[in-house]
């Protein structure tokens, strides 16, 4: 997908520049093109729970938050949803863009205390796009899905799966007795169906 995005962006450079009305617009497009390899090749949306908050970063790895300037570009297209057992409804949480000391940034959303004690579905989605094509109603966009669910026991996953609306999910769950010898298994889903032959990287900080 990385190589495909680069190819698409290169193809669109000529049409994008031809639509610019002045030198300032052309320089802005060229600057964004210069930034594209770093963004496309390494940046992802990460979510974790920390100090009673949901924390979202846009960076190369979950251990190192990315530049606030990049996160600001996607902040108004980010949605965070929460459902806490036994509630059968999902709440959309307000999010705030926060600055960190080194110039990086993060999005945060306050969590109720019950979210850390009961089974809770916590997930989000974001859109990111840089290069609108002239004459088209919608620009080409990347879509991100991320989550930080809380499950106290294996049975909690039925509740979490029922509330989740993310099209793509990668979760770590207790191994299923009789089906796997592992204590933990990686479950990948796309549009509610198991996604096979997927390569998953696990970051341990």
Image: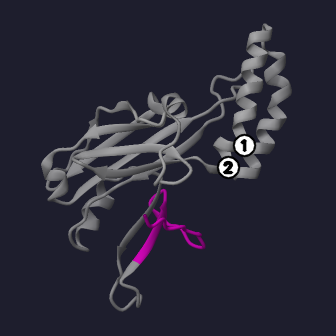
The answer to which image quadrant residue 121 occupies is: bottom left
Q: How crowded is mark 1: few (under 14 residues within 10 Å), some or many (20 or more)?
A: some
The answer to whether residue 147 is visible is yes
The answer to whether residue 133 is visible is no
Residue at the front extreme, as displayed: 101
- Which segment did they paint magenta? 185-205
Q: In this view, does 191 lie above or below 186?
A: above
Q: Position of residue 126 (x, y in %)?
A: 48, 39
Q: What element carries label 1?
A: helix
Residue at left offset 81%, top offset 44%: 7
The answer to which image quadrant residue 86 occupies is: bottom left
The disc placed on residue 37 is 1
Residue at the top extreme, as displayed: 22
Q: In this view, does 202 lie above or below 14?
A: below
Q: What element carries label 2?
A: helix
Q: How crowded is mark 2: few (under 14 residues within 10 Å), some or many (20 or more)?
A: some
Q: Is residue 45 above or below residue 74?
A: below
Pointers 1 and 2 in contact (C-beta within 8 Å)? yes
Residue at left offset 80%, top offset 10%: 23
Camera-nearest residue between 23 and 77 = 23
Residue placed under numbered mark 2 in the picture? 41
- The secondary structure making up most of the magenta span is loop
Q: Does the magenta stretch include residue 197?
A: yes
Q: Is residue 132 magenta?
A: no
Q: Where is residue 174 in the image (x, y as percent from the top left)?
A: 33, 77
Q: Position of residue 35 (x, y in %)?
A: 70, 35
The CA distance from mark 1 to mark 2 is: 6 Å
The disc placed on residue 137 is none
| Image position of 75 (left or right of 113) | right
Residue at left offset 42%, top offset 35%: 101
């Amino acid at each position: 997908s990385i190589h495909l995005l680069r190819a698409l962006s290169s193809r669109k450079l000529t049409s994008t520049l031809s639509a610019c009305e002045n030198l300032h617009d052309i320089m802005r497009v060229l600057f964004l093109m210069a930034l594209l390899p770093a963004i496309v090749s390494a940046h992802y949306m990460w979510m974790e729970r920390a100090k009673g908050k949901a924390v979202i970063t846009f960076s190369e790895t979950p251990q190192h938050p990315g530049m606030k300037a990049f996160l600001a570009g996607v902040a108004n297209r980010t949605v965070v949803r929460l459902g806490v057992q036994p509630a059968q409804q999902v709440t959309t949480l307000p999010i705030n863009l926060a600055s960190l000391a080194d110039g990086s940034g993060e999005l945060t959303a306050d969590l109720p205390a019950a979210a850390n004690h009961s089974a809770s579905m916590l997930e989000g989605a974001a859109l990111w796009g840089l290069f609108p094509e002239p004459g088209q109603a919608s620009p080409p966009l990347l879509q991100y899905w991320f989550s930080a669910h809380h499950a106290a026991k294996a049975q909690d996953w039925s509740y979490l799966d029922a509330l989740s609306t993310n099209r793509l999910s990668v979760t770590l769950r207790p191994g299923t007795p009789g089906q796997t010898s592992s204590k933990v298994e990686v479950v990948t889903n796309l549009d509610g169906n198991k996604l096979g032959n997927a390569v998953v990287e696990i970051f341990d900080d």
